[in-house]
Amino acid sequence: MIQKIIFDFDDTITDNQLLDYMAFDIPCKKLDIKVPTRNKIRNGRKKGLLAKDIIVPYLEKFKSTTENRFFYLRNQFLNNTNCSKYLQPQKNLRLLLGNLKDRKIECIICSSKENKNIIIKFLEESDLIDYFSAIYVNSDLGFQLDNHGKENRVLIKRSLLHSILKKEKEEIVFIGNFEDYEASRGLRLKFIYYQNSYLEFHNLKQTITVKDMIQLNRTINQLGNTK
């Protein structure tokens, strides 16, 4: 029986589309650079492109110092608690969390974010804070690790998962995107791949895949009834 569920934060329990756009819009406007359209960003994300891949064509006429400045401003924005206002809960998230609370299943957040207060503020503003018993982020590792690259984010989450599993002996389910799948491989976890329509799709064989919170709720109910 499932006793605990670990959720990834960005693009799993949150809809990050507006936040992602603003993370391009704000630094571009400050540097007087053309802003990529939302469709351009969305199409890039569907192909698995990183922010650098998307913005570089818009920086070709500028010096490398402009690129460095862009990412400084971008990271400054993304690490500020005020960015939480651009996040939205995934549709039907509250329904899922209510079901888990009724079933006495403990919920935990595991994120590679550097600033835990962003998550706390989002949960408070969305009236979701009481559904989660713990939040683990980059700074909980005890050492500083840059979270801007995919490899580092996977390493951060894997290290956090190790820390969580040392304390927990119950059956635990981890829900997240492809990076979370990579972080959880080989660990004592059952993984559910949350296929966010905003991100690149990965065909993960022998891994449970869900497309929305309703399907996730149904899947967890089915797993909970399996002994």
Image: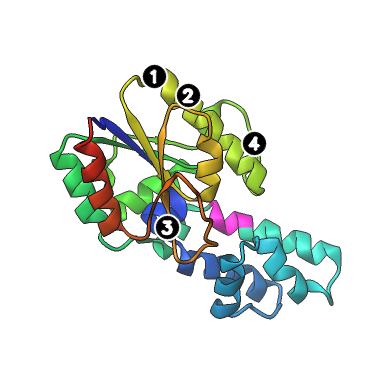
Q: Quadrant of the C terminus?
A: top left
Discs 2/3, front: 2
Q: Nearer the viewer, residue 146 or 169?
A: 169
How packed is label 2: few (under 14 Cα within 10 Å), some, or many (20 or more)? some
Residue 209 position within the rendered picture, expressed as x and y whole percent measured from the top left: 40, 52
Q: Do the residues labelled 4 and 2 touch (CB within 8 Å)?
A: no
- For the point 21% across and 44% down, the residue is 221
State the separation of the CA atoms marked 2 and 1: 7 Å
User: Closer to the N terminus: mark 2 or mark 3?
Assistant: 3
Q: How many marks?
A: 4
Q: Which mark is residue 145?
A: 4
State the separation of the CA atoms marked 4 and 2: 16 Å
The answer to whether residue 8 of the structure is visible from this angle is no
* Local secondary structure at mark 1: helix
The answer to whether residue 28 of the structure is visible from this angle is yes
Q: Do the residues labelled 2 and 1 touch (CB within 8 Å)?
A: yes
State the separation of the CA atoms marked 1 and 3: 30 Å
Q: What stretch is highlighted in magenta?
A: 75-79
State the separation of the CA atoms marked 3 and 4: 22 Å
Q: Which residue in the structure is indicated by mark 1?
A: 167
How packed is label 3: few (under 14 Cα within 10 Å), some, or many (20 or more)? many
Q: Which residue in the structure is indicated by mark 2?
A: 163
Which residue in the rendered view is the most extreme toward the front? 206
- For the point 20% across and 55% down, the residue is 95
Check the image and report above or below for 19 versus 99.
Answer: below
Left or right: residue 35 versus residue 1 is: right
How packed is label 1: few (under 14 Cα within 10 Å), some, or many (20 or more)? few
Q: Which residue in the structure is indicated by mark 3?
A: 84
